[in-house]
Image (cartoon, rainbow, N blue to C red):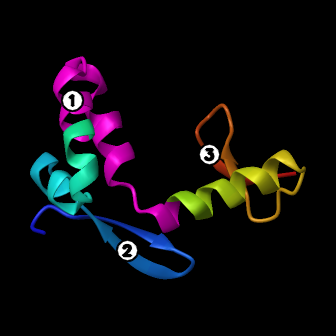
Amino acid sequence: MEHALRTTVRGRRVEFPGTIDDIRASLPAEQRAEFDREIGAAPIMDVPLIAFRWSYPPEAREEDDEIVARIKAGEFAGVTYLDVDGDASAAP
């Protein structure tokens, strides 16, 4: 994929589709019509978010869900945040 996006999941580099055509090609055949309907009917400003949601690797989504669950449970180890000046700081 020429325009692949990249992220790290559990310490491993993962590539995912970076174009509408590549997203569509990466989907199982039974999901393509649904993707086409959703992306085709989307307001132009929503297209990037919808495309990202369809292209995001399941293992990355699972890792994100685990992080959110940890934060909701009150565990902030390894979490950083931006203060009002935009500086990154470790969570208290």
- The residue at the point 83 percent across, 56 percent down is 76
Residue at the farthest bottom position:
12
Place of residue 39 in the rendered image (x, y in percent of width and height, measured from the top left): 22, 31
* Amino acid type shown at disc 3: Asp
Q: Quick one: label 1 or label 2, which is nearer the N terminus?
A: 2
**Residue 63 falls left or right of residue 57:** right
Place of residue 87 in the rendered image (x, y in percent of width and height, measured from the top left): 62, 45
Image quarter hosting the N terminus: bottom left
- Bin the neighbour count of mark 2 within 10 Å (Cα to Cα): few under 14, some 14-19, many 20 and up: some
- Main SS, magenta region, reads helix
Secondary structure under tag 2 reads strand
* Amino acid type shown at disc 1: Arg
Q: Quick one: label 2 or label 3, which is nearer the N terminus?
A: 2
- Alpha carbon of mark 1 to alpha carbon of mark 2: how far? 27 Å
Place of residue 72 in the rendered image (x, y in percent of width and height, measured from the top left): 83, 45
Which residue does the numbered mark 1 point to in the structure image?
37
User: Residue 32: in sight, yes or no?
Assistant: yes
Which residue does the numbered mark 3 point to in the structure image?
87
- Alpha carbon of mark 3 to alpha carbon of mark 1: how far? 41 Å
- Bin the neighbour count of mark 1 within 10 Å (Cα to Cα): few under 14, some 14-19, many 20 and up: few
Judging depth in this view, the residue of 50 and 75 nearest the camera is: 50
- Residue 56 higher or lower than 9, as above or below: above
Which residue does the numbered mark 2 point to in the structure image?
14
- The residue at the point 71 percent across, 50 percent down is 68
Residue at the farthest top position:
43
The stretch in magenta equals 35-60
